[in-house]
Image: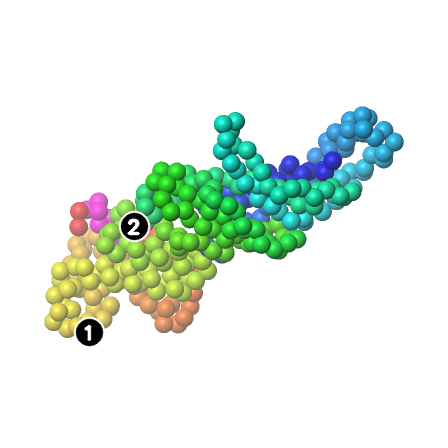
Amino acid sequence: MQPFADHIAGEITAALKRLLDGKHLYQCVDVNLSGINEENAEEVRKRFQVHLSTTGPNMRKPTVEEVIESGKQHAKKKWIPMEGQMTEAGCQRYGPAPTVTIQGPQYVPFEIPSIQTYCSHCEEAWPFNHFGKALTVGDGQDQWFCLGYQCQKCKRLPVWFMVRRKGVKLILVGRDPIEALPTPEELPKSVSKYYGDAQIAHHAGQTLAGIFLLRTFIEQFWRTLPEVKQAIAAQPRTTGDQQGDIYQAGLPEKFKEQFPSLKDIYGRLSAAMHEAKPDALLFENSCVRVVKHFVARKLLDL
């Protein structure tokens, strides 16, 4: 009998789902093992006593401390994803043949969860099911898992995730194809990709690149406007600040008084970029202000 085996396996599955559902490249989650505690250990001891009464009445009942330590040691073993295969009887789980010694199973089998993530083809979040074979590399507490998932709406090419395990931490270290993020519908679609790419860079820990891309989004929006195109045609070296002045001059005075200024946001992003300053707070605040600006434009039909 391995204490907490089902609990540990379930928490690994839950953590993997949290990671693939809501995290981005190089972000991580911890497997929650807080359930390995004195209260639950006492329940394990009671079940163990029932087990001994029928199979080994002369064996010693473990202490609470021993049960907790046994659970913690089990969580440190190799984690193996269990594959699924659909049959007439339903979904059957299978994995490598278990290796069992006097210390119990030598690995922790866990189920691969279904997830919900953004599908770039469907352009919305949709359920994804595990696809193909899972590849596991590494041993002990240092492992890598390669997992394929397929959108259940369009069933197009699968998305492949590379997940690293470090102790009880799971880290999203790779994805093919690269992540695509939905952008607010108020943003101009022709240049919204720069905004989405800025978000991806920031989430991946490359905030300076995100600042550059967000600044690019603003400038490329300005370049779609007839008055800015006309200025660039007359003077190809028209700077971003000059383009911002042209855009600002065409806005109603009340709009400029009430809503965030793209020219101001652009200037702050430019300063951070030229100083090579990966200011996460500036980036996040700028994103909020950019969206507010375009929401206002849409409401006022500008």
Identify the element where label 2 is drawn: helix
Identify the element where label 1 is drawn: loop
Give the residue at x 38% y 67%. Answer: 272
* Label 1 vs label 2, nearer the camera: 1
Foreground pick, 53 / 226: 53
* 176 part of magenta stretch: no
Label drawn at residue 237: 1
Q: Residues within 10 Å of mark 2 (few under 14, many from 20)?
A: some
Q: Type of residue at label 2?
A: Lys
Give the residue at x 43% y 56%. Answer: 203
Give the residue at x 45% y 40%. Answer: 129
In magenta, the rendered stretch is: 291-300
The spot of residue 56 in percent (x, y) is 83, 30
Label drawn at residue 292: 2
Label drawn at residue 1: none
Foreground pick, 5 / 63: 5
Foreground pick, 195 / 270: 195
* 299 part of magenta stretch: yes
Position of 86 relative to 25 (above/below): above
Relative to 6, is 247 on the left or the right? left
The spot of residue 117 in percent (x, y) is 41, 44
Quarter of the image with the N terminus is top right
Identity of the residue furthest to the right in this view: 58
Q: Type of residue at label 1?
A: Arg
Give the residue at x 85% y 35%. Answer: 60
Residue 194 visible in the snapshot: yes
- The dominant secondary structure in magenta is helix
Verify CB contact (< 8 Å) between mark 1 and mark 2.
Answer: no
Q: Residues within 10 Å of mark 1 (few under 14, many from 20)?
A: few
Looking at the image, tell me whether mark 1 or mark 2 is earlier in sequence order.
Answer: 1
Looking at the picture, the colour scheme in use is rainbow
Relative to 45, is 108 on the left or the right? left
